Amino acid sequence: MEIQNYINGKFVKPISNDWIDNYCPADGEIYGQIPNSSTADVENAYKAAETAFNDWSQTSIEERSRILIKISELLEANLDRFAEAESKDNGKPIGLAKTIDIPRAASNFRFFGNAITQFSSESHESVGQDAVNFTLRQPIGVVGCISPWNLPLYLFTWKIAPAIAAGNCVVAKPSEITPLTAFLLGEICTEAGLPNGVLNIVHGFGKTTGHAIIEHPNIKAISFTGGTSTGAQIAKIAAPMFKKLSLELGGKNPNIIFADCDYDDMLRTTVRSSFANQGQICLCGSRIFIEKSIYNKFKSDFVEKVKQLKIGHPSNPDTDIGALVSIPHLEKVKSYINFENDEGGTILCGGKQITINGYENGYYFEPTIFEVTNNECRLNQEEIFGPIVTIMPFDDEDNALQMANDIKYGLSATVWTNNLKRTMRMSSKLQAGIVWINTWMLRDLRTPFGGVKASGVGREGGFEALRFFTETKNVCIKY
Ligand code: NDP
């Protein structure tokens, strides 16, 4: 299958006619080619976006809203096709793609199609000075959106939808590892009547295609989701050009379990928050801290449940754990297994790459639980972003909090307790952009989303995203 760039409403080959192989993680086969786009392709995408901007920024809110909601409806109507594509490209279980990834991509368009109709700005009456101030929130112009491979369409649309809802035109790049659903999205946008040039999708490597978007002098805002070190490189390039930046970066999130929690609910959810999408979700709770009094019980129950997870081909509806996304990522995950010897951790289950009959070249790895004794170990400090979690006991609230915060990351945290005062203390003291109490990944798209410390800068979601994708201008009228 040949994936092409989507520029000015047309599917086009890369100018260089240079291509990258696209691998299927479930069987290791090459099943397509994607454009290895250069600076010249990005320039064409930019020009199309710039040309479209005048009309699109003047298009009524109602019309923009109508088109976004139409895109959402078309995604829903094509659920199976998109879910199959996402599962094949990424290795994720088809059930997950059908119930989470694609419905959520559709929700992103519907949500921001509605949100833009409710987005308002402030007015300040300067009493005693015969003046009134009001604030305009104007689209920025051409903006860049760059997204990772773990939740491909879900995160791609999380950026694109608010950007175009707010009246901007977009040059977007999905991860070159998972380009397929972004490619299919182009068709849907055309069918929904999105004017040519409002959304332009260029495929290629981050270091070249992504870099060309970041360093383009007239792409004035960048919304990026990906790794922390990539975010730092992007900031270095963008900062001297004074670009607006939203960076959603890595996480190494604590899951803190107190003895007074609803145990069964906690156990069920902890299996999910550890291994959903093969642990390749930035919000996964990969450091699990358990109150000492229930530690041994939790340890045996958790191991038993995780051993029951079915690893299999992503297209099998019974599969819980599909394939990891790529060989380099599989190798990275495997490299942490040696830490058992290096740092005194003990593997309680998993720990091995496995083969699935008929798909011997697929990238499968067992869900793995390490018991560790020291929060300073690399297993507890580095983002693995795969099916590996650690468990460790804590003595009391202060001890749990100290370990949870003693890390460079600060994306999300989960706390399991039925003690209201503790809930409030923990919520206030945890260093994270998002805190879940007695749940995990329960999302309401109106809420601010993002991290602190090395997990990012800025917030997306709800009106925060619309604020990011608009420039604020105050107008003062003396009467
Ligand atoms: P990367 O940082 O490697 O890549 C993310 C995107 O940026 C890809 O499209 C990539 O292209 C591109 N890119 C890479 N280098 C550059 C560059 N120099 N300039 C511009 N673009 C570039 O992350 P991964 O794709 O490996 O995704 C995993 C990471 O994403 C994890 O750290 C995870 O925690 C984080 N993440 C954060 C989330 C959040 O909301 N905070 C949500 C989901 C994931 P290419 O693929 O071609 O290299």
Image: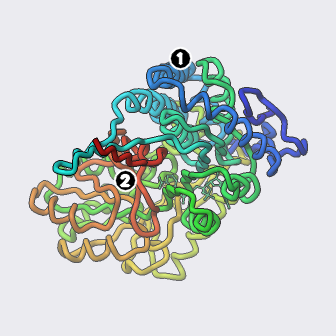
Query: Considering only vertical position in the picture, is 340 above or below 445?
Result: below
Query: Considering only vertical position in the picture, is 447 above or below 199?
Result: below
Q: Secondary structure at mark 2?
A: helix
- Residue at which label 1 appears: 77
Q: Residue 228, how many percent across, how many down?
A: 54, 65
Q: Which dot marks residue 409?
A: none
Which is nearer the eye, 72 or 465? 465
Task: Please rate how many residues cluster around mark 1, counting C-alpha atoms within 10 Å: few if below 14, some from 14 to 19, many from 20.
Answer: few
Q: Nearer the viewer, mark 1 or mark 2?
A: 1
Q: Residue 39, how many percent across, how many down?
A: 80, 51
Which is nearer the eye, 302 or 77? 77
Task: Please rate how many residues cluster around mark 2, counting C-alpha atoms within 10 Å: few if below 14, some from 14 to 19, many from 20.
Answer: few
Question: Which color scheme did the rendering employ for the protein?
Answer: rainbow
Who's the residue at 61% across and 47% down the image?
A: 144
Q: Residue 350, how many percent across, how many down?
A: 50, 59
- Residue at which label 2 appears: 304
Who's the residue at 77% across and 34% down the image?
A: 3
Which is nearer the eye, 329 or 296? 329
Q: Is residue 123 left or right of residue 376?
A: left
Q: Quadrant of the N terminus?
A: top right
Q: Quadrant of residue 62?
A: top left
